[in-house]
Amino acid sequence: MARHALFRERRIGHKQRSDEMRKRLVLRSLIGKLVGALKLDANREIIAAGPALKLRLASVPGARSEWHVLHDLPVAPDERVRRHAQLRDLRKIRMRVGCKTARKELINPGAAELARRQTDAMHNDEVRGDTRGARVKMRRQHLAHPGEKPRGPINLHAWNNATIALRHAENAPMSDSNASYVARDLAHVWHPCTQMKDHEQDVPLVPIRRGQGVWLEDFAGRRYLDAVSSWWVNLFGHANPRINAAISAQLGELEHVILAGFTHEPVIALSAALVKVAPPGLSRCFYADNGSSAVEVAVKMSFHYWRNVGQTKKRGFITLANSYHGETLGALAVGDVELYKAIYKPLLMEVRVVGSPDCYAREPGVTWAAHSISQFAHMEEALARHHEETAAVIVEPLVQCAGSMRMYDPVYLKLLRAACDRYGVHLIADEVAVGFGRTGTLFACEQAAIRPDFLCLSKGLTGGYLPLSVVMTTEDVYAAFYDEYVKLNAFLHSHSYSGNPLACAAALASLAIFDADKVLERNRVLAAHMGNRARVLEEHPHVAEVRQHGMITAIEFLKNKAAREPYPWQERRGLKVYRHGLTRGVLLRPIGNVVYFMPPYVITPEEIDLMVTVAHEGIAKATCD
Ligand SMILES: Cc1ncc(COP(=O)(O)O)c(C=O)c1O
């Protein structure tokens, strides 16, 4: 018996195959792995993709690059390719390849798969069904580098009815089609908000091949429910057809143009659309390209406004304890999450931090509203004492997302608006995370019926597709900058990609979905379901609180419920939940000891059930010792 047997599916049950072979196949790969997933038909073999192996393919039809990375070769060379391949390389492949790595998506002869044209960094593949029978036609062109364009038709004679092969490596370590991506990634990519060493230890890096709706799929075909909307950006699912179409249409017209001195239809239309839905009075839109930049804009604009109107003493900012506004130096300065801020303090401007209305800290039996009102005393005092030197107060309305999804009552915003008016201080509402329906209303400020002086929006603005942010402000603020050029009162702030047309087109499509699908109404039903399901966890001996604002639900677990004693952060218990989530196909990304859900709005009740169940299991695992 060859150590690395080649298996042809058409021989299943055939007397040529020994019992041992059958057992091996059945036990190690076919059950639930391939047969179920792939519905293999006759005349095909499958090859498992291996990690970062290189195969010299001297005369692969259409090949231009001499070296072919095998992990990018999920649909294997057919017989003729195999013949051309150097023997030693094949042996190497056989040593390494494991059945676990078969990439079902490429060889699944289902209609959707076969109709799809696939292009990745190294290949231009076309996989099509053959109407004459259950056969797969495959055309492949090898690209020398990721940017290379496919070079016209491929030699179909060579590739028609390509045999797809699976090699089993009996004693080889199980390889994973994700592994090569991970290796290539770790060679050069420095990931955001990450201790990179973790990825070499026990925190898996997950390469994602595609997304569809709430689901992400890796290169081994494993799926993950995106319970965090990919860092709170995605609203209507991955690969949303309507947003895709809008971006494609825009792509054919104009990809980008400088927004200083020039303009374009998508930015004009988007500005009008935003003014229509934002709190009344916010009639001016200033664009940037991410949430932190929007905060920088609002902070600079407020400071600059007061200078332009002759109040040069007003240059300070007040922020809430535990708030987060981004990572650039200005945004970091007006935030208060120690983990991100502490090290950079010498670089940051001083801001005044006042007690947060965060309702986690309330006494038993006290309502959110009562607690939020009582906490306002800190703000009132700060404003009374410092308003003369304060330009603005900045808050995250209703939910301090990066600050462990701590929540408070809308009444606080009402009191804050009134106090800012009384003391002549701007109010900056940073709705970068909570805007676009997350808290139940399109904007969180609506729940307090207030209009901030600056409204910062990003993340969901484009439905989670492209980087774009906007600061919406009033005619009063706009007028303070409107002057003769030589007075140098203009707001001379810019970003290269400000108001990018593709991003604006995505934003317009996303806003249209809110209307067309009555999203906020539908979300009320989903939010109620999510809340009901999650509240079951309140009984858990290590769960301190389940809290919710609209489509955001958070579960805070701790060491000792009676004493409200948290687990030490060094124990990284949330990471256990994260890891468990991945094994169960749910992307949960706890913040410390807080597991939260902020899913795309296209999630179904059944998917919510799965998400909550997996979180429940994860918390049980993370708190069992
Ligand atoms: C409230 C808030 N403001 C600003 C930011 C920064 O946005 P970005 O990551 O796009 O710079 C974030 C990011 O999470 C946020 O939650």
Image (tube, rainbow, N blue to C red):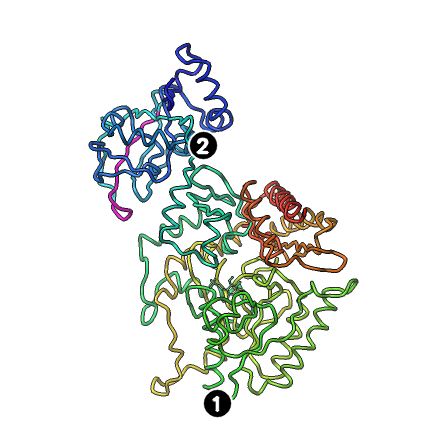
Start-end of magenta stretch: 136-148
Are the residues tagged 1 and 2 within 8 Å (C-beta)? no
Above or below 5: residue 51: below
Callout 2: 10 Å neighbours few (<14), some, many (20+)?
A: many
| Marker count (numbered) | 2
Q: Is tag 1's residue or tag 2's residue first in the polypeptide sequence? A: 2
In front of the other: 539 or 338: 338
Kindly identify the amino acid type of the residue bearing the numbered disc 1: Gly
In the rendering, at what x and y percent does residue 158 appear? 23, 27
In the rendering, at what x and y percent does residue 139 appear? 28, 32
Which of the two discs, 1 and 2, sits closer to the camera?
2
The residue singled out by tag 1 in the image is 310
In the rendering, at what x and y percent does residue 337 appear? 56, 67
Residue lying furthest right: 365
- Relative to 615, 494 lies left or right: left
In front of the other: 289 or 287: 289
Q: Can residue 112 be seen?
A: no
Is the CB of the residue bearing disc 2 within 8 angstroms of ligand 1?
no
In the rendering, at what x and y percent does residue 421 appear? 61, 81
At 56% across and 68% down in the image, what residue appears?
Answer: 338
- Relative to 191, 622 lies left or right: right
The residue singled out by tag 2 in the image is 100
In the rendering, which numbered label is found on residue 94?
none
Q: Is mark 2 on a helix, strand or loop?
A: helix
In front of the other: 537 or 574: 574
Where on the picture, by quarter, is residue 564?
bottom right
At 52% across and 66% down in the image, what residue appears?
Answer: 340
Residue 142 drawn in magenta: yes
